[in-house]
Amino acid sequence: MDSLIIAAAQALRKGDPLSALKRVALRDDAPALALRGIAMAQLGDLARARALLQRAARGFGVKEAAERARCIVAEAEIALAARDLAFPPKKLDMARAVLKAHGDATNAAHAAHLEIRRLALIGRLDQAEQKQARLDPSRFPPPLLAAHELAAAGIAIRRLKIRNAKAALARARDAARRSAIPALIAEVEAAMRALAAPAARLIVEGHERLLDLAEVEALLESRTLVVDACRHAVRDLALAVPLKRRPVLFTLARTLAEAWPGDASRVALLARTFRAKNVDESHRARLRVEIGRLRQAVKALAEVRATPTGFALAPRRAAKVAVLAPPFEGEHAAVLAFLADSEAWSSSALALALGMSQRSVQRALDALAADGKVQCYGLGRARRWMTPPLPGFTTALLLPSALPDG
């Protein structure tokens, strides 16, 4: 390589894209196009960066397989930043294999981290952890080590293993400071702030207060029967019963939990669960049926007792009952949770991440846009949706993830 290419590459490693562009901005050879693409990505022009990297990949010859693979990895990173979750994983795997075969262990590991981050983003935590465990970070340079620890922290946060997340972020901060890359240092600091931000509301005996993620972890490890409105489940220290696919039962459980240690009246249960304004015998019959189903669903955790005016929840092992509610609620809270990262999402990427149909996601986005909570730009397939982050809150508990094991 000539001296300008080497100097531009060194500038990019230090997080200085402007210096890199000064050296290669007027060149159209494949190495210069690749460096220009990376520089444009660091400056935030992702569409232009992707086009430049694709041109560079086509420009490398047959004997330059490693260079072409590096372009593919860079394009995959841009796709992840642009929330294009449809980037072919097999294409990234092939590029990683080529880099590994050519002795480029650093970029091969970087390709693996991109796939880990993608898997974590769409809630496939088991797969992400398996891939993370195969990597040996002992020889990673500081920037890659920081990325490795950030990925580990992200998985730990989704698992609600906050002590593990804090330790990983401390290691990431140390590695980022050794890298001396301002953008990387800022990313780690932002992750640490999010970890300390309020994440949920605790409702016990009619009183409400905010919890951060560490307090949520402590709550789930305590002798408390928790009706979790973030993950739609009922759980204690030993067992979790998911009710995400049974919204009527979950609404009944939450209403009973909010009334604990007292009971919830039949009128309140009918109004909240069935939104019944004029109650008749059919509503009462349906309530009896759904209460019976709730008894069966949570029988290992609690008893649902009839009272003269309604029903009451009596935990079997737990000392008390609490409701864990999101920091904000609404019909489309999960969609807002993804958009709160300030990235621009397509409706197809949101559908993939949420496990919903694209039509359902589009209806949710239209409703949120009508309320002024989200905004879009672009037309057709180029349309992207985004919203400013909710100030002072983390939405980690609203993102898809397996419940912590009991």
Image (spheres, rainbow, N blue to C red):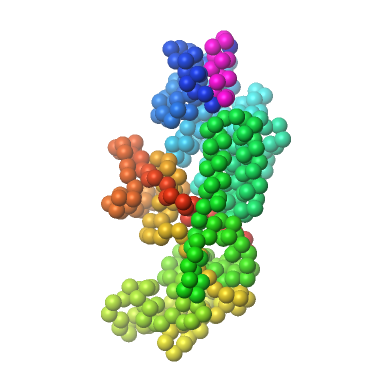
Asked if residue 231 lies in the magenta stretch, the reply is no
In the image, what residue occupies the spot 34% across and 47% down?
Answer: 374
- Relative to 155, say whether 296 is above or below: below
The quarter in which the C terminus is drawn is bottom right
Q: Which residues are magenta?
A: 2-14
Q: State which quadrant residue 149 falls in.
A: top right
Q: Residue 380 in the image: x percent, y percent?
A: 30, 38
Q: State which quadrant residue 330 falls in.
A: bottom left
Q: Residue 171 in the image: x percent, y percent?
A: 66, 41
The quarter in which the N terminus is drawn is top right
Q: Residue 291 in the image: x percent, y percent?
A: 45, 79
In the image, what residue occupies the spot 55% across and 51% down?
Answer: 196
One can see residue 373 in this view: yes
In the image, what residue occupies the spot 54% across and 14% down?
Answer: 5
- Relative to 174, say whether 215 is above or below: below
Asked if residue 9 lies in the magenta stretch, the reply is yes
